[in-house]
Image (cartoon, rainbow, N blue to C red):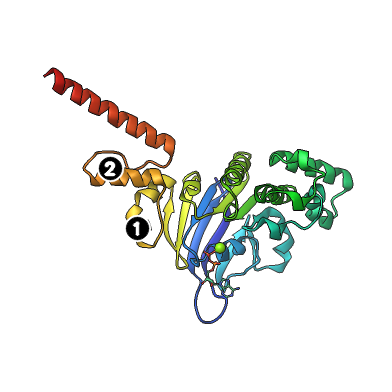
Amino acid sequence: MSAVIEFQNVSFRYNEEKDILKNISLTIEKGDFVAVLGHNGSGKSTLAKHINAILLPSEGKVSVDGLDTSDDNNLAAIRRKAGMVFQNPDNQIIATVVEEDVAFALENLGVPREEMVRRVDESLNAVGMIEFKKHATTKLSGGQKQRIAIAGVIAMRPDIIVFDEPTAMLDPQGREDVVNITKKLNEQGITVIYITHYMEEAAQAKRVVVLNDGEILIDGTPHYVFQNAGLLTSVGLDVPQSTSLMFLLRNHGIKVPLAVLNEEECISVLTDLLNTKESINGSDFKG
Ligand SMILES: Nc1ncnc2c1ncn2[C@@H]1O[C@H](COP(=O)(O)OP(=O)(O)O)[C@@H](O)[C@H]1O
Ligand SMILES: [Mg+2]
C-alpha cells in the first residue's frame, strides 16, 4: 500500500491562545477506511479540514497524494482528489432539484453536458437515490439529503472522501444507509476518513485513530483500540456495547475474549459460553 495522506509534525492554532492540533504525525494508506474518534473539541474537524486545504498547518506539513496543501498551485487538484461530507445535510444542499444539486460542482468545473449527465446518474445510483432525480431537495428526509450530498461528492470522482460526523443528525435508518454507502465506496477503492462519535460505526472501520486534546491517543485496528477500554473511558469515550458487555463478564470472573466489536461476535461468544456451561452442568449431573 502507498501513503495517500501524510501529516508530518502538524500543529495548528486558530489564534495564539492554544494549539488545537499538537505535533500530529499520521500516514493514511490508499484504500484505507480510517475512523477518527474523540470527544467534542478534541480537534477532529480541524484535522479533517487540513486534508483538503480548508486549513493549513501552523507548523509542519500535510500532503495529499504527494501534493503539499500549503502550495496554492496544488489547491484545485487537492480539492478534486479529496471530497468532504459534513454533518448538516441542509448546509450542503444548494439546488432545488436533486439532479441539479448533484451536478452543481461539475457545472462549476465546466464538465461537458453528456459527461455530467452520466456522472449524475452514476452517483445517484451509488447512493440509491436515482428515482429521486427530479424531486425537490426540500422535500427529502435528512438521510436522503445526506445521500444527495454524498452523490455530489462522488460525482467529482474523488480518491478520498472525508466524512465529518455524517450521521450525527440522522435517524437510525438514515445512519445505517450512510454507513453502508461509505463501506461500499471504500470497497470500490476510495480512501475513507470517517469522523464519528458512534462507537459502533467506528468499529466497522479498518483503522481507528482516537484524538484527545489535539493529540493522537491511540491508533490501530478496531480490535486493538477497543480492547483499551480503560484508556478510552479515562478520556470520556465509550466502547461499543458488545465490547462493554465482555468487560463486565470479565469483571465477574467469566473468561471471555475482549476483542468483541459487534452483535454477531457477541452472540457467538455468548452461545459458546452457554454451550460450555451446559456441558459442564451436564457432566455434573451425570457424575
Ligand atoms: N474557527 C475557530 N476559531 C477558533 N477556535 C476554533 C474554531 N473552530 C474550532 N475552534 C476550537 O478548536 C477546538 C477543536 O475544535 P474542532 O476541531 O471543531 O473539534 P471537534 O471536531 O473534535 O469537536 C475547539 O476548542 C474549538 O472551540
Ligand atoms: Mg467536529
**27 lies left or right of 252:** right
* Nearer the observer, 258 or 144: 144
SS under mark 2: helix
Q: What crowding class fits label 1: few (fewer than 14 Cα within 10 Å), some (14-19), or many (20 or more)?
A: some
Q: Can residue 204 be seen by looking at this rendering?
A: yes
Q: What crowding class fits label 2: few (fewer than 14 Cα within 10 Å), some (14-19), or many (20 or more)?
A: some
Question: Which image quadrant shows ligand 1?
Answer: bottom right
List the single residue furthest toward the front. Answer: 139
C-alpha gap between disc 1 and disc 2? 19 Å
Badge 2 amino acid: Leu
Image coordinates for residue 271, horizontal then vertical, percent? 33, 29
List the single residue furthest toward the left. Answer: 287
Pointer 1 residue:
231
List the single residue furthest toward the bottom. Answer: 16
Q: Are marks 1 and 2 in contact (CB under 8 Å)?
A: no
SS under mark 1: helix
**Marker count (numbered):** 2
Q: Can residue 156 be seen by looking at this rendering?
A: no
Looking at the rendering, in which quadrant would you find the N terminus?
top right
* Nearer the observer, 79 or 282: 282
Q: First in sequence: mark 1 or mark 2? A: 1
Determine the residue positioned at 39% across, 61% down.
Answer: 236
Pointer 2 residue:
249
